[in-house]
Image (cartoon, rainbow, N blue to C red):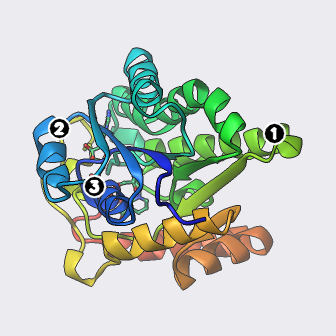
Amino acid sequence: MGFEGKVVVVTGASSGIGEALCRKLLQQGAKVVMAARNISKMQQIASDYEDAEVMIIEADVSKKSDCEKIIHEAVGSFGEIDVLINNAGISMRAIFEDLDISVIEQLMAVNYWGTVYCTHYALPYLLKSKGSVVGVSSIAGFQGLPARTGYSSSKFAMHGFLNTLRVETLKQDLHVMIACPGFTASNIRNTALTADGKPQGDTPLEEGKLMTADDVANRILSGIARRKRSVIMTLQGKLVVFLGKFFPAMVDKMVYNHMKKEKDSPLK
Ligand code: NAI
């Protein structure tokens, strides 16, 4: 599928992977619906594409009514939806023992419920267009990631939801794809919530050494064009998923040891 003339809704469009997706789609002539909370950041991005057909919607995907608004306004302006990319997401870093439970509630609200709400409102249009619904997930949706209970649960839940939707619509030609980037340079670790729900405001990783949002966006768009079921973007991710099926205890240890090496790791 080429994206020219296609109506594509991207949540979390103001930064990182969402921004990179929108830029690529606008360059390719798609009609892009950008949704996020930071309207001025989205306006700034869209202003780089003068003749593009682009819509900017201020929305918090943890609110059902905002997700309804995204889809309602998208269809009101462009008449249809070909692709919905559920990309908006937040992360966290703290062990469960120390964690204020509201952190998990917030992660589920954005990462899981945001995906469910947007997909719910977009589904009639996606079924009509035989389009694609995408969840931008993570290897944390396949393997429990220590100090990320809320993040992992939200991504596991997202997988359960999208995998079930794929089976339910098997005879209706809906394309459902789960995309799992590796660690990617973005704002996600700065906004990640700590034990008391405050943003971390820093990154424990060397962002310059991570995947770029541009690379991730290319892989997601290529996966949509080829109607792939899932896109796991790194060898490390592929190994974790594959080995986790046969040697789960070994993978638990590997993951623990890896995450323990992180700067200021909260693991004991
Ligand atoms: P980012 O922090 O740069 O971008 C996240 C986007 O989601 C921003 O536009 C932000 O404003 C938006 N967002 C957050 N809460 C929202 C809400 N309540 N309503 C509407 N929009 C909201 O982070 P990044 O890395 O671009 O994240 C995009 C997706 O990629 C997330 O779902 C994340 O879980 C996933 N991912 C990121 C990885 C990474 O290492 N950066 C690795 C694997 C997956």
Rendered position, 204 above or below 126: below
Decide which of tag 3 and tag 1 comes sooner along the chain: 1
Q: Secondary structure at mark 2?
A: loop
On screen, residue 174 versus residue 151, left or right, reads right
- Three-letter amino acid code at disc 3? Ile
Residue 89 visible in rendering: no
- The reply to whether discs 3 and 2 touch (Cβ–Cβ < 8 Å) is no
Q: Quickly name the residue at label 3.
A: 188
- The reply to whether discs 2 and 1 touch (Cβ–Cβ < 8 Å) is no
Is disc 3 surrounded by few (<14), some (14 to 19) or many (20+) residues within 10 Å?
many
- The reply to whether discs 3 and 1 touch (Cβ–Cβ < 8 Å) is no
Return the residue nearer the eye: 150 or 54.
Answer: 54
How far apart in space, not on screen, are marks 3 and 2 (Cα)?
A: 15 Å
How far apart in space, not on screen, are marks 2 and 1 (Cα)?
A: 34 Å
Q: Quadrant of the N terminus?
A: bottom right
Decide which of tag 3 and tag 2 comes sooner along the chain: 2
On screen, residue 113 versus residue 35, left or right, reads right
Q: Residue shown at 86%/45% (left/top)?
A: 170
Q: Quickly name the residue at label 1.
A: 169
How far apart in space, not on screen, are marks 3 and 1 (Cα)?
A: 32 Å
